[in-house]
Amino acid sequence: MAKYSKKAGKSVKNAMHRRKKGTLKSGSGKKVTSRKQAIAIGLSEARKKGAKVPAKRAKKGAKSGSRSTRSKSTKKS
């Protein structure tokens, strides 16, 4: 079974062409030169269009909700 749809592949291909041309911009408006970033933008655009793309991976080291929120008690005798 295919991981990505053809529509997603076209979106990534389009983003790669725009990167080569120098017209691909990131969210902050800066020019994208990284191949990996261009792929990520293409997949993100495909997701917005409703193409079959797996969900984003969780960031490394960012554990959601597992950190305890104990406060240290400062008792004075």
Image (tube, rainbow, N blue to C red):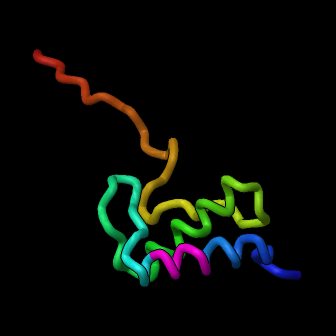
Residue located 36% across and 32% down the image:
70
Outermost residue on the left side: it is 77
State the residue in front, 15 or 58.
Answer: 15
Above or below 35: residue 68: above
Q: Position of 77 compared to 40: left or right?
A: left
Q: What count of labels does the image hold? A: 0
Q: Residue at x 30, y 62 (%)?
A: 30
Q: Quadrant of residue 11?
A: bottom right
- Left or right of residue 12, residue 2 in this image: right
Classify residue 57 by image quadrant: bottom right
> Residue 75 at what x, y percent from top left?
17, 19
54 in the magenta segment:
no
**Quadrant (top left/top right/bottom left/bottom right) for the N terminus:** bottom right
The answer to whether residue 8 is above or below residue 47 is below
The percent coordinates of residue 24 (x first, y second) are 43, 69
In this picture, is 35 found above or below 67?
below
| Region of the chain picked out in magenta, as a range | 13-18
Q: Is residue 51 left or right of residue 76?
A: right
Q: Nearer the viewer, residue 70 or 56?
A: 56
